Image: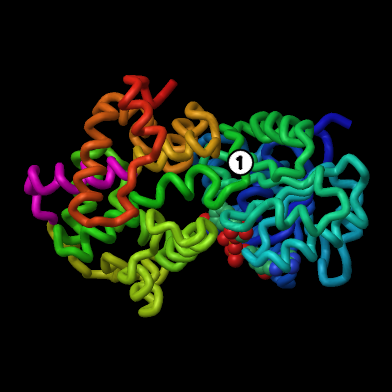
Amino acid sequence: MSDRGFPVGVIGAGAMGRGIAQVAASAGHSVLLADANADAVSQARAAIGKALDRDVEKQRRTRAEADEVLARIVDAGDVRHGHESFRGCGLVIEAVVERLEVKQALFTALEAVVGPHAVLATNTSSLSVAAIAGACKRPGRVLGIHFFNPAPVMPLVEVVPAITTEPVVTERMTSLVSGWGKTTVVATDTPGFIVNRVARPFYGESLRQLEEGIADVATIDWAMRELGGFRMGPFELMDFIGNDVNYAVTRSVFESMYFDSRYSPALTQQRMVEAGLYGRKRERGYYDYRDGATRPEPTMDETLGRGILDRTLALLINEAVDAVHHRVASPAAIETAMTRGVNYPRGLLAWGDEIGAATILHRLEALQDDYGEDRYRASVLLRRCVRERRPLLS
Ligand SMILES: NC(=O)c1ccc[n+]([C@@H]2O[C@H](COP(=O)([O-])OP(=O)(O)OC[C@H]3O[C@@H](n4cnc5c(N)ncnc54)[C@H](O)[C@@H]3O)[C@@H](O)[C@H]2O)c1
């Protein structure tokens, strides 16, 4: 059977699982969708049905196509009684709760029923793929396939082989998911993979500037959006993602990086989470989304705005260069990931080349000098590129 023809299992019918099910079914697979919560699959099917209705309204697909896609997504039954229904699947993707022991137990149960050529994929954002695969008898067929939210809309998928994944499995899955219309990049199994690692300063350095009173939320957002060309400012984006989710990712990357101060979370973000100010989903975050609330005006001071942008951008570019240095992914994959995964206006390496690697290094050294903190240390690759007059994107 070709990879396009086999049934795909999706376990976990929450925000991500339902989106992944829609993507696989749209590509022609029959999809078995399961969840530990009895009502979750019917709720997921209803939500997918609504998303498909919107596609029909916007003439992105015909009514008949939408009906066929939904019909291909079937309820796999109650997983608490076993995973027998996944026996015929060529690929099972899990999108269950982000807890290592839950994912390990799930894969251990699955490998007892699926066929010898079936692939087991995790959609984890922050756990080690090796640790999930390590619980399996055949870790060679386990890898990460990391979609972004919402999966049907976001074009990027990070394919993440663990050190134990067979190369042929990575190749097969990269080509399968590319065939689903996604832009795939291969990333090494390191904390945050590409996007969630390289993007950390977008949030972290903005929070720092807020905490230091350099500017308020609205001004920092204005600077990054209007002067930097980012689609959303960092505080708008954190409110959109959910401050609870963003804080959890930040903590996870920080802890997994052995508490490297480059990734340290901000106390402000912790307090926002403790106070329940999660962002849009709670109608309150850095901004107030309740009816009648007014939006604060930014201070449109261009000198101040440039300072905010230059500082955050220097850290972002340094992070992208350091990801190249640590072979998280190829330079081209890092450019693709940041433009397609989080809609950055341009690739950070190319942006760094345009500004000049020496200027970026100078900005970082000035910050490190001022703060005396390791957080601002320049990547050794940035130093080498400056010394050898090499471009960052090569
Ligand atoms: N939300 C995001 O932005 C995002 C983006 C990329 C990756 N992820 C990752 O995707 C995964 C799912 O995230 P989500 O946001 O969809 O979570 P969610 O809470 O919306 O959904 C998780 C679902 O898994 C179910 N579940 C829990 N344990 C289960 C089990 N043992 N068997 C079957 N079902 C089980 C829950 O009932 C729930 O419906 C996580 O690993 C997360 O890190 C999330």
Which residue is located at x 18 percent, y 64 percent?
A: 212
Q: Is residue 137 left or right of residue 297?
A: right
Residue at horizontal 62%, vertical 46%?
189
* Of 332 and 80, the residue lying toward us: 332
The answer to whether residue 321 is left or right of residue 59 is left
Which residue was labeled with disc 1? 188
Residue 228 in sight here: yes
Numbered marks: total: 1
Query: How crowded is the residue under tag 1: few (<14 C-alpha within 10 Å), some, or many (20+)?
Result: many
Residue 54 in the image: x percent, y percent? 52, 46
The image quadrant in which ligand 1 is located: bottom right
Is 162 included in the stretch rendered in magenta?
no
Foreground of the two, 18 or 325: 325
* Residue 145 in picture, x, y percent from top left: 66, 45
Compared to residue 263, the image places residue 180 above or below, namely above
Residue 210 picture location, percent across and down: 21, 62
Badge 1 amino acid: Thr
User: Quadrant of residue 171 in the image?
Assistant: top right
Compared with residue 254, is residue 19 higher up or lower down, i.e. above or below? Answer: above
Camera-side residue of 384 and 168: 384
- The answer to whether one can see residue 71 in this image is no
The rendered magenta stretch, by its main secondary structure, is classed as helix
Which stretch appears magenta?
A: 298-315
Residue 25 is situated, as x and y percent measured from the top left of the image, at 71, 42
Residue 299 is one of the magenta-drawn residues: yes
Horizontal side of residue 110 vs 40, given as left or right:
right
Task: Give me the residue at 65% from left, 60% from top.
Answer: 44
Asked if residue 88 is positioned above or below residue 78 in the image, the reply reads: above
Q: Going 48% across and 31% down the picture, which residue do you hit? A: 336
The quarter of the rendered structure image containing the N terminus is top right
